[in-house]
Amino acid sequence: MKKIITILCLVFLVGISNSQTGRSGKPVITISPFEYNTRGDNYPSAVSQNGKQLYYTTESGSQQVVSFTDMKNSRWQSPDEIESAVNSGKQNGSATLTPDGQFMVFASYKHDVSSLGRTDLYSSRKVNGKWQEIQNLGPSINTEYFDSQPTITSDGNTLYFISDRPNGQGGTDIYVSKKVNGNWQRAELVQNVNTANDEATPFICSDNTTLYFASNRIGTMGGFDIYTSRLKAGLFTKPENIGEPINSPSDEYAYIALPNSPIAYFSSDRTGGNGSLDIYKAEPNPEMPNAVVTMKGVVRNANTNDPLGATVIITDLKTRKKVADMRSDDITGEYFVTLTAGRSYSVTASKEGYVFYSERIDVPMEEKGREVEKDIFLAPIANDAETRLLVFFDTDKADLKDESLSDLDRTSDFLKDNSGIKVRIEGHTDDVGDDNYNLQLSQRRAESVKSYLVNQGIDTKRITVQGFGETKPKLKGTTDEVRAQNRRVEMKIVK
């Protein structure tokens, strides 16, 4: 049986160091061993993108298992094996996680859950701090052959993995499957990257564009080398060898990059290690992926401040299509999402029994990467509970812009799911302009929101409207930022 090589998704954010430069003027790449290498094979696996927990595969006797270690005081702590059915197969590993750390895909040989072949891919969800709900990914992904080494995009909707099934290009090849309406589609061979030799350990970066993988194709420095390719117009570019000192006369696998950081990790059996394959850190990364915007925080009960496990939906405001479906942690309430450039998003947290909350995040095409920290507070459904609606109007107008419709559809769904409540739509303006004109404008905007909801099937008797003009500012001040916060439409529960 082929070894289950894992993918390391170390994605905590690290500042750029002042690297020395060589004679060529290029930064000198420093290679250093990872602190938990052992005499057995150590395969880098995954870290949820809040950087607080590392998953990796290690040998326990004759069995490979998925283990983890927590980051505390800037150091990884003593590792433990995952105490769940994830490790109930004869061999287990290759864990990859979505950025929120709540959804895992892993490989297992002869798992207790029914298998379709030698090694299959499985999914698991984190529920109340434990990995549960293990499912075989099914015949769209798995075959009777070797299916392993998964890596998942930051939106959780595209899965890359390797397989030695027939009709490939030879050896092990990289395949891809996309999730449509919650279902994985039949996997297809990735074009432009596979050869008659072996491709292994693919890793798709947080930009969902940059792909790293290992291959023993003709022209390597020795055994398996690391290659990189980028997705352009739906196809990957011609792979390029990442070069020295990452590659060597030994075998290199599982190269991964941290978002917005010069740090990368990979595995190698080069001379000087502790065992067979060891994990190494490379800094700076010679093939940086595109920068992304990261958004993180804690979802909390607005009344008690207690953390909440909630659904976190990311929507493209222009197309109204759901980009990603994530979760905050059931115990800590922490959430983490990544957003690629060139879009405007709504990030919405919701939980049964609570009023949803949405936040708009704009990521321009020229975005160079930044981190947004924002705690989200959900109000329990009760009288006077309220939330700001993401609705947008042109200056001095009350016609809803298209970017408003995704949040209004969410509002409609909320009212349908909670048919016993009545709400008031409240319009507010900033302090620019005539007081009376602003009062009328806020009223007309609130009425536009009601009209849309009624057209979506909400009983008109359940919705009242009121415009307040500039009389109830959310913040005091006259800056553009303050006025933007004061221009708003809110939904308040009145019964």
Image: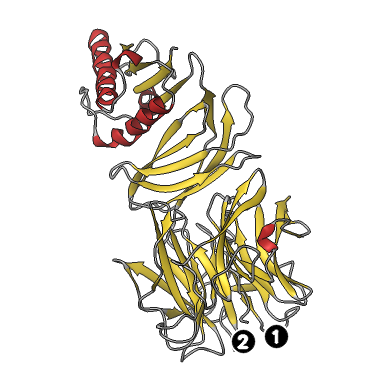
Under mark 2, the amino acid is Ser
Mark toward the start of the polypeptide (1 vs 2): 2
Which residue is at the front of the view, 425 or 131? 131
User: Is residue 336 shown above or below 444?
Assistant: below
Spot occupied by residue 264 in the image (x, y as percentages of width and height): 57, 67
For the image, the number of numbered tags is 2
Q: Residue at x 49, y 18 (%)?
A: 385
**Residue 389 can be seen in this image:** no
Evaluate if marks 1 and 2 touch, with contact meaning CB atoms under 8 Å apart.
Answer: yes
For the C terminus, give its image quadrant: top left
- Tag 2's secondary structure? loop
| Mark 1, other Cα within 10 Å: few <14 / some 14–19 / many ≥20 | few
Determine which quarter of the picture holds residue 106.
Answer: bottom right
- Find residue 126 and name its label: none
Q: Residue furthest top?
A: 436
For the N terminus, give its image quadrant: bottom right
Asked if residue 300 lies left or right of residue 82, the reply is left
Q: Residue at x 69, y 64 (%)?
A: 88
User: Which residue in the structure is indicated by mark 1?
Assistant: 271
Spot occupied by residue 334 in the image (x, y as percentages of width and height): 59, 41
User: Which residue in the structure is indicated by mark 2?
Assistant: 250
Which residue is at the front of the view, 443 or 31? 443
Alpha carbons under labels 1 and 2: distance apart: 8 Å
User: Is residue 187 shown above or below 463?
Assistant: below
**Residue 39 can be seen in this image:** yes
